[in-house]
Amino acid sequence: MSNNKKRSTILIFDSGIGGLSIYTELRKSMPNAHYIYLFDNKMFPYGDKSSEFLIDRVNHLIKTVTKSYAIDLAVIACNTASTICLPSLRSQFTFPIVGVVPAIKPASKLTKNGSIGLLATKATIRRAYTSELIAQFATNCKVELLGLSELALIAEDKLQGIPVDMVELKRLMQPWLMLPTIPDTIVLGCTHYPFIKDELQLIFPQATFIDSGVAIAKRVSNLLTLNNQLDDQLSEPNIILSTQYNKYVERIAKKLKDYNFLKYQRITDVDV
């Protein structure tokens, strides 16, 4: 019977390769799904882009992918895009779309000293959605916000094999290191940041770090199970798509074979 079941295709979207942290968790629970990873490296990073631009851009890119692939579920593995684009995307597409939002709620349950740190892009820090999460789930906590676009670039470099400059990373963390009460629970509010969690842990040795990867994987697994679209039949290879091909993509495409992405393709229908 299982040979006749449909193998689910999951689209993972991010501006860069930070969404691989989400993919890693998805693959643990759904190792045999068909994964398409699309990153918009032509416009990376997203943190400095306007809401209007991102809504048009993300909708257009996902529509372009659906012209070539039958998508069963999409994960917007980018906090900035999730806080801006989800309502528009869900009105445009019939398949489920799962967003990534800062893990404020679980962090509020973990903290022991009542101080939570939200480490994210400047765009995510500014969004009303983030303020609403804090107001809803962390009213009894002090939430320290630190918006840094540099960390995504540091994470991308690390994935290419470039060592993290610990002196520079510690400099970026100074606003928290100087606080009278340093957060004991730190929310990694960008999908890039789990890739430098080990380095951040050296700077905040007493802190617990939390991200959305496990929760997203559980949500996706539940949705696909409900839709009867989980299967154990392997066929097409996992695919990497990007909006620009350059030396960086050439290097990273080779590294992504370690993540079981065996095919690369550049999206050419990008006019937004």
Image (cartoon, helix red, strand yellow):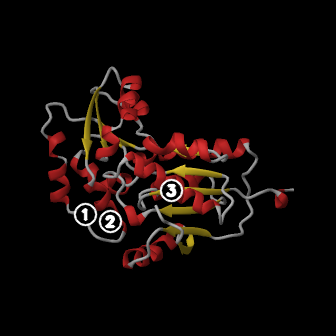
Q: In this view, does 170 lie above or below 142?
A: below
Q: Which of 110 and 50 is in front in this view?
A: 50
Kindly identify which residue carries mark 2. Answer: 158
Which residue is rendered at x = 65% and y = 63% of the image?
67
State the image coordinates of residue 35 (x, y, percent, origin top left): 60, 61
Res. 134 image quadrant? top left
**Quick check: 136 left or right of 11?**
left
Q: How crowded is mark 3: few (under 14 residues within 10 Å), some or many (20 or more)?
A: many
Kindly identify which residue carries mark 1. Answer: 164
Is residue 58 in view? yes
For residue 31, the mark is none
For residue 13, the mark is 3
**Quick check: 175 left or right of 222?**
left
State the image coordinates of residue 51 (x, y, percent, origin top left): 39, 46
CA separation in Å, label 1 and label 2: 6 Å
Q: Are the two marked residues, 1 and 2, in contact with CB atoms closer than 8 angstroms? A: yes
What number of labels is visible?
3
CA separation in Å, label 1 and label 3: 25 Å
SS under mark 3: strand
Which amino acid does the dot numbered 2 rest on? Lys
Q: Which of marks 1 and 2 is nearer the N terminus?
A: 2
CA separation in Å, label 2 and label 3: 20 Å
**In the image as oriented, which residue stretches furthest toward the top?**
140
